[in-house]
Image: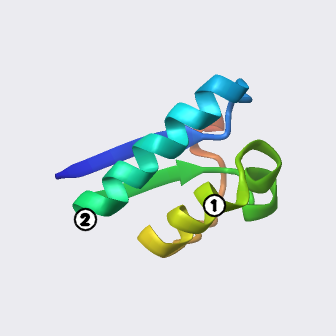
Amino acid sequence: SLVVFDDMHRQRLTEWGATVFHDLIDELYDDGSRVIFTTNATRDEFLDALDESTVSRIDQMCAPVVVCGPNRRYRDET
């Protein structure tokens, strides 16, 4: 299966939400699911919001791909 988490780290998780997210990541890891995360956050920003074990699992599941360029949301409309 493929799971996509889009725009991660946009809102801070509650303690309950972080626990549920950790359990979900563990389950996806154990199942060998393919996972894609999109975010503008750095790894350190993830560590501020999630515990080390969750971020470590994400590190094991994913390879970072940095995409650079202009923000396409602000196209020149003239």
Q: Which of 45 and 30 is in front in this view?
A: 30
- The x and y percentages for residue 38 are 51, 50
- The x and y percentages for residue 52 are 71, 60
Q: Residue furthest left?
A: 1
Q: Specify whether residue 77 is in view.
A: no
Amino acid at the residue labelled 2: Gly
Q: Specify whether residue 20 is in view.
A: yes
- The residue tagged with tag 1: helix, strand or loop? helix
Which residue position is annotated with label 1? 53
Amino acid at the residue labelled 1: Ser
The residue that appears at 48% across and 74% down in the rendered structure is 60
Q: Nearer the viewer, residue 61 or 15?
A: 15
Task: State yes or no: discs 2 and 1 in contact (Cβ < 8 Å).
Answer: no
Neighbours of disc 1 within 10 Å: few (<14), some (14-19), many (20+): few
Mark found first going from the N terminus, 2 or 1: 2
Q: Residue 32 carries which label?
A: 2
- The residue tagged with tag 2: helix, strand or loop? loop
The residue that appears at 77% across and 55% down in the rendered structure is 47
In the image, residue 35 sits, relative to residue 59, either above or below, namely above
